[in-house]
Image (cartoon, rainbow, N blue to C red):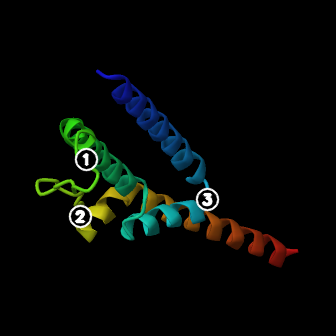
Amino acid sequence: MTRIDRMSETRRNSLVRRRSWVKIFSSFSPAGALGFVSTDLARTGFYHQGQVQRAMDGFLHYYADYVWVREPKFWGMDPNETLDLYDFVPLAYRHSDTTAEALARNLPQIINLLVLVVIGFTGAWISLLRYDVR
């Protein structure tokens, strides 16, 4: 494992830990659950961020190998000559999950949202009944 691989793995692991802490702390708020569901359905949530990160890691390995092979040619070129990149493959990443998969992935947040709403309305109803009795 190279040094850049270790640095990338360390960074990725720290991001995963931070994301899990964010999910835990924000699960106490209905707005947090709603935020997770809406960002995941919009394909901008933590899951998709991880997917893009994995695609970028793979692409950067390809790009580093590509540059490593091309670098000797580049430095030995005439300044007026152009570098031919005919075999370079640009990054092409597309989200492939369906809305049903996104909803299934967010089922814990949806259930959390429903439970918090029920608890909130129950507490409000009980306090209204107590206030009404006085």
Q: Quadrant of residue 7?
A: top left
- Dot 3 falls on a residue whose secondary structure is loop
Residue at 24 percent across and 57 percent down: it is: 91
- Of the image marks 2 and 3, the number of the one nearer the N terminus: 3
Which of label 2 and label 3 is nearer to you? 2
Task: Give the residue pinned by disc 2.
Answer: 94
Instruction: Tell me the distance, in whole angstroms, between the alpha carbons under discs 3 and 1.
Output: 37 Å
Q: Quadrant of residue 13?
A: top left
Q: Amino acid at mark 3?
A: Ser
CB contact under 8 Å: marks 2 and 3: no
Q: Nearer the viewer, residue 65 or 61?
A: 65
**As drawn, 36 above or below 128:** above
Q: Earlier in the sequence, mark 2 or mark 1?
A: 1
Q: What is the three-letter code of the residue carrying label 1?
A: Phe
Identify the residue shown where x is 68% and y is 65%: 123
Task: Determine which residue is flagged by label 1.
Answer: 59
Q: Which mark is residue 72?
A: none
Residue, disc 3: 29
Q: Nearer the viewer, residue 84 or 57?
A: 84
Q: Residue 92: x and y, percent? A: 22, 61
Q: Is 19 above or below relative to 3?
A: below
Q: If the image is split into quadrants, where does the N terminus sit?
A: top left
Query: Badge 2: few (under 14), some or many (20 or more) residues near its Cα, within 10 Å?
Result: few
Measured in 3D between alpha carbons, the distance from the residue under mark 2 to the one under mark 3, in whole angstroms, is 32 Å
